[in-house]
């Protein structure tokens, strides 16, 4: 399942949800990533952390990062509604 995050707060919320769904503590994830528990708490709160921490947390959760175009494509929207 894919979820979209448009800012660091939303990304942190999604990471927290993934971690909790697995029953993992922040401390357990921090150990896997190689950082302090507080760093995971900061990541989940949407605060600024090093990119290698973000990527490590994503990898530990079995997730990746996709760079997607978030702009509205008016042509694709028109196609969805047909000739209406």
Image (cartoon, helix red, strand yellow):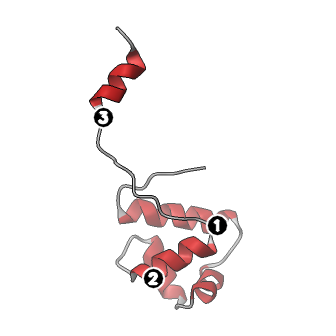
Which marked residue is nearer to the observer: mark 1 or mark 3?
Answer: 3
Mark 2 residue element? helix
Residue 6 placement, left or right of 57: left
Disc number for residue 20:
1
At a point 68% along the width and 74% down the height, the residue shown is: 24
| Towards the viewer: 74 or 13 | 74
Which one is nearer the viewer's eye here, 41 or 8?
8
- Sequence-wise, the earlier of marks 1 and 3 is 1
Disc marking residue 8:
none
Task: State left or right for residue 55 relative to residue 83.
Answer: right
Which is more N-terminal, label 1 or label 2? 1
What label does residue 52 carry, if any? Answer: 2
Q: Residues within 10 Å of mark 1 (few under 14, many from 20)?
A: few
Which quadrant of the structure image shows residue 81?
top left
Rounded to the nearest angstrom, the CA distance separating label 1 from label 3 is 35 Å
Image quarter (top left, top right, bottom left or bottom right) of the C terminus: top left
What number is the disc on residue 73? 3
């Amino acid at each position: 399942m894919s979820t979209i995050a448009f800012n660091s707060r939303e990304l942190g919320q999604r990471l927290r949800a993934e971690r909790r769904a697995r029953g993992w503590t922040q401390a357990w994830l921090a150990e896997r990533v190689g950082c302090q528990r507080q760093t995971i708490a900061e990541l989940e709160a949407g605060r600024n952390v090093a990119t290698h921490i973000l990527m490590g947390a994503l990898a530990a959760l079995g997730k990746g990062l996709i760079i997607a175009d978030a702009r509205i494509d008016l042509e694709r929207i028109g196609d969805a509604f047909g000739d209406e």
